[in-house]
Amino acid sequence: MRGMVGRSGANARLERMFMALLMLAANVGGGCGKREEVPCRCPDATPPAAPSIGASVEHASGAGVSAHEPTEAEARRWLDEDYVPAVRRLERAASLMSWNAYVSGNQDFYRAKEDADILYRRFHSDRKTFERLKELKDSPAITDPLLKRSLEVAWLQYLDNQIDPALNARIVELSTGLEERFNTFRADAGGVKKTDNELTKVLRETKGPDEARTAWEALKQVGPLVAEELLELVELRNEAARQVGFADYYAMQLAVAEQTPEGLKDLLDRVAAMTDAPFRQWKGAIDAELAARFGITVEELRPWHYGDPFFQSAPPVEGLDADGMWNGRDILAVAKSFYAGIGLETEAVLARSDLYEREGKVQHAFCFDIDRGGDVRVLLNLQPTARWAETTLHELGHAVYDVGIDPELPYVLRGAAHQLTTEGVAMMFGGLAASPDWQEAVLGSRPGAELAEKLRQRQVRSWLVFARWALVMTDFERELYADPRQDLGARWWEIVGRHQLLVRPEGRAEPDWATKIHLVTAPVYYHNYLLGELFSAQLREHLAREVLHVDFPAGVVFAGRGDLGPWLREHVFALGKRLRWDEFVEQVTGRRLGPEAFVAQMEP
């Protein structure tokens, strides 16, 4: 039975992974920037042979971690000889299986991805190794800061997997199946299969209330198909967390991310308080515009009128054709030129990437660091729109961060300081696409005063709208894991109403909460997008005043500043995971993470 983890189950997984690797070598999977029905294999994409992965899994039994007083020599030996060689192969294989599943939609790759994830989790599930690793990381005999930090980061991976192997396998099996269903689902709109891009375009452009409602409801069709299994997944995750001693999975994942429920809630309560009044003001203006556009009263506005399936992006500003700036432009060429101008190259990343829509391919966008050794790729579904211009800059922001991490760091520390720090850098660069000053500097065409003001309005609206949406996701996930069997529909719309001021459609009883893929693929992660916005604003302010010596941070667009990239590489990217995220933020920006810079950038 698929999902069991006995010796025969492990062998079956290795066989499936090996077959997927053969498919990869035969050019069935992979990714590139070409518009082809079948993606081609990227250069240097062949992972290690499956038998070496199997040997690594068998070796994860605690060998090399002895029961005497810890020493630095012992810790280094365990990391260098037992842990890193095995986890490097496991991570690379899992990354390649994920990449090829996402770009092709091929079920064999999804099954191989599932198997790779289970093997990775099984590797980190050994209890004796976990306990001895805790002794190592806490020992006063470990004085080398990089060694100590490496042990802490490795221990967190073990903490996340101290659960029953069969339960762990079932969680991976269920989440992979749900992810595949999300990624390959295409909505039915009037008897025609439509992509998310097509339906979102309708939401943003139509002036017909019925057409908007049809598109919005089509984007929610996946909810009933996944809701029950998603609830089962939540309950299994909670069961796993309780095995490790946590109240629920929400608390456990925050601990793994070196965060606390209390600290996070305090920070986000401050964000909610500081954005409430400006959001209500801008929401009133948005409502008036939308009511006029659809020929209805403000009281008749419903979620499908807001131009986005979740109101996580601001509706188009009346009279602003944001996409018009990108018609006929080569978004990739613009992005490459911009990054090159600030001293950050993206050519090699894009050569390995997969950039255009394809049947079965994931409809979203990602950045992948395949091996912590330079094989960094982005997955896009490019269209000549403002959204995809921003998304391209955003994902390449992740990419230059990953590429810029010091390759001499210990393997375990070759990653972004935290999810929020890489999100912050990506958001800082992605947000430039909406700036009139950036458009003038990079595109060679400055919008007129009226258009520039509308672009400014769009940017401020986007910050506020996204902040309030992220509060919805964070509050809902906390409630979801606290009580999965409550009336989640009622809870979802109560939270949406509180933070986004949207009205629940009359009589609507569908599980709309279940239509957000992040609940499956990135659980207890969404708050990091909002924290990333806070870090982005703080970093931008610091760069403007202390590095570029500009008095008005909101006007900084970085274009042509060849000194920016080297500074970021040295002071941000290269640090990797040397520091905890809170220490990292304070060292890089000069203060603790807070909402002040984020709110200040919205002021006229």
Image (spheres, grey):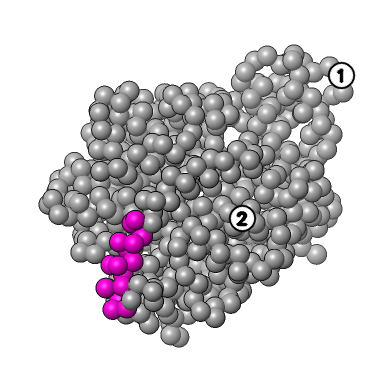
Q: What SS does tag 1 mark? A: loop
Instruction: Specify whether residue 288 is painted magenta.
Output: yes
Q: Are marks 1 and 2 in contact (CB under 8 Å)?
A: no
In the picture, measured across the screen, residue 594 lies left or right of residue 8, that is left
Earlier in the chain: of badge 1 and badge 2, it is: 1
Q: Main secondary structure of the magenta part?
A: helix
Q: Amino acid at mark 2?
A: Glu
SS class of the residue under badge 2?
helix
Q: Which quadrant of the structure image shows residue 120?
A: top right
Determine the residue positioned at 51% across, 27% down.
584
Q: Position of residue 235 (x, y in %)?
A: 74, 59
Please provide the residue range marked out in magenta: 281-296
Q: Residue 15: horizontal and vertical position, in percent?
A: 72, 55
Task: Identify the residue position indicated by label 1 in the image.
Answer: 68
* Image location of residue 355, percent across then percent down: 39, 55
Compared with 274, 356 (above or below) is: below
Residue count near mark 2 (Cα–Cα under 10 Å), binned few <14, some 14–19, many ≥20: many
In the rendered image, which quarter is residue 599 located in? top left
Residue at the (53%, 45%) spot, across then down: 269
Spot occupied by residue 421 in the image (x, y as percentages of width and height)? 48, 37
Specify the quadrant that holds the C terminus: top left
Q: Nearer the viewer, residue 568 or 351?
A: 568
Outermost right residue: 67
Q: Is residue 520 magenta?
A: no
- The residue under the point 43% across, 85% down is 190
Q: Does residue 592 show up?
A: yes
Question: In the drawing, does residue 161 fall left or right of residue 197?
Answer: right
Is 573 placed left or right of 143 in the picture? left
Q: Is residue 420 above or below residue 565?
A: below
Q: Amino acid at mark 1?
A: His
Judging by the rendered image, the residue that carries numbered circle 2 is: 477
